[in-house]
Every structure is written in structure tokens, then in C-alpha cells.
Amino acid sequence: MKKNMGTIDKVIRIIIALIVVALYYTNVISGTLGIVLLVLAGVFVLTSLVSFCPLYMLIGLKTNKADGK
């Protein structure tokens, strides 16, 4: 797996995940929607930690500019 996520992308994903978790635990979002958003938040955190997004690979998007390509 080659890294395809830049730092700003990772930070934005983690912030979104934290917001979703906070909204879920304060009962602003709940039910099926809440669970789906929690799973999505978990995916955001996981992809941020490994700096790789499979969806980016499928569509050819790369936000990591470190290797100069």
C-alpha cells in the first residue's frame, strides 16, 4: 500500500470523526443513521492512521504530495 493521503486530508477526517462521535454520544444523532455515521467515522480514523484510502486509489486521487509525483 502506497500512501495516498496528505496531512490536511488526515486531519480533516479525524476532526469529522470526532464531531460524529460527539454528536452520537450527546444524542443529536441516533438510531440507524447514528450507527452508520459511527462506522464511517471509524473508517475515517483507520484510513487516517494508515495514510491510505482505497476509494482514492480507485478514482486515482492522491492528496499526498511528499514524493513529488
Image: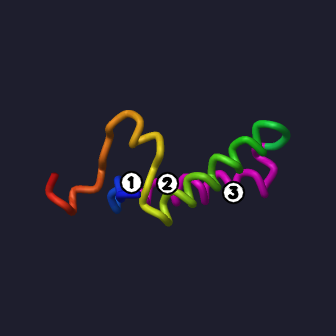
Whether residue 27 sits left or right of residue 58 in the image: it is: right
How packed mark 3 is, by other alpha carbons closer than 10 Å (few <14, some 14-19, many 20 or more), is many
Mark sitting earlier along the chain (3/2)? 2
Residue, disc 1? 9
Residue, disc 2? 13
Q: Position of residue 36 (x, y in %)?
A: 73, 41
Q: Where is residue 63 in the image (x, y as percent from the top left)?
A: 30, 50
Q: Position of residue 52 (x, y in %)?
A: 43, 55
How packed mark 1 is, by other alpha carbons closer than 10 Å (few <14, some 14-19, many 20 or more), is some
Instruction: Report the magenta residues as a range.
Output: 10-29
Residue type beneath disc 3 = Val
Measure how far apart labels 3 and 2 are at the Cα level.
12 Å
Which labelled disc corresponds to residue 21?
Answer: 3
Q: Main secondary structure of the magenta part?
A: helix
Q: Position of residue 44 (x, y in %)?
A: 55, 53
Quadrant of the image for the N terminus? bottom left
> Secondary structure under badge 3?
helix
Which residue in the rendered view is the most extreme toward the top?
Answer: 59
| Residue 14 belongs to the span the image colors magenta | yes
> Secondary structure under badge 2?
helix
> Secondary structure under badge 1?
helix
| Residue 49 belongs to the span the image colors magenta | no
Residue type beneath disc 1 = Asp
**Which of the 4 image quarters holds residue 45?**
bottom right
* Image: 33 above or below 26: above
Tag 1 near tag 3, CB within 8 Å: no
